[in-house]
Image: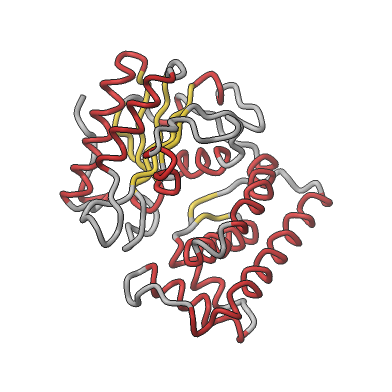
Amino acid sequence: MKIEINPTVVKLDLNTQKQIKQCLDIVQKILGQDLLGVYLYGSSMVGGLQKYSDIDVFVVANRATTGEEKAQLAKALLAISGIYMKSDDRPIEMTIIEKTAVNPWQYPPLFDFQYGEWLREQFEQGNSEPWQSKEMPDLALLITQLLLASTTLVGPSPDQLLCTIPYKDFMAATIDALPHLMSNLDSDVRNVLLTLARIWSTVTTDTIGSKPAAADWAINRLPKKYVPVMERAQAICIGDQKEYWQDIQELIKPCADYMLHEINTIITEITLSNDFNRSITIA
């Protein structure tokens, strides 16, 4: 199968396209005829790849992968997923789902396999299934993004395989994702702050934008004392500054807590009003 990427639209560099082709080769070899669709989404499609952006690949299969196949996937992806400052390759985030686990839709949805750099150490130790549960509320958010803005690499358009996510479940998934997100604040400051900004923007405006754009949005709404925190996160994201937090360390958690409170307040208001006859769009 051939990669169906329009470089004038996606604007990917050759090295990134090479990694995408490698991802396709891996899933095609393992899933064969059971591979239904492969899609590129995330920063590649919304806002453009930034310095620390992953290559987000979503795979729909006709069956679940076996334990041996998961081990093969982990080994192959470890070899091609880059680590910043050690490789020119980008990190890869690959999510594989079995079609019948998400279509017809039910919440919380189930996934089959996921690779991301945050799991690298466990994969390197030989644990090819490092998750505690196959439930993945975050799939509601990923599939929404995918249906709104993606490039089809293999198979039909994603709306032929995936269901539109109900607005109520999108908000439920957002709430469910927050505790895990906040637990990573100390170890992944930049990404957590930018993700909180994007969530805050999304639940307020019903639109999904890039992390740098969400940072702009949050900067205009944060109390002045927290603005340097978000400006730093944005500058690191776009490559204008190196990762450095020591000088504003005491403001990080209060800034995150402020955004978390705003997010919870908005979603509570939506829930209490039963105002779910809405939809998410791309900014």
Q: Is residue 230 left or right of residue 24?
A: right
Return the residue nearer the eye: 282 or 36: 36
The residue sitting at the front extreme is 125
Residue 241 lies in quadrant: bottom left
The residue sitting at the top extreme is 33
The residue sitting at the left extreme is 14
Q: Point out residue 152 in the picture as x, y percentages from the top left corner.
A: 33, 34
Coloration mode: secondary structure
Q: Point out residue 219 in the picture as x, y percentages from the top left corner.
A: 54, 77
Q: Is 63 situated above or below 20?
A: above
Q: Is residue 197 left or right of residue 61?
A: right
Q: Is 215 situated above or below 191?
A: below
Q: Is residue 223 left or right of residue 98?
A: right
Q: How many marks?
A: 0
Q: Point out residue 100 in the picture as x, y percentages from the top left corner.
A: 54, 18
Q: Tell me what residue is drawn at x 48 percent, y 44 percent.
A: 145
Quadrant location of the N terminus in the rendered image: top left
Q: Tell me what residue is drawn at x 49 percent, y 62 percent.
A: 188
Q: Tell me what residue is drawn at x 55 percent, y 65 percent.
A: 186
Return the residue nearer the eye: 34 or 181: 181
Q: Point out residue 217 in the picture as x, y percentages from the top left corner.
A: 53, 71
Q: Is residue 12 left or right of residue 197?
A: left
Q: Is 59 situated above or below 52?
A: above
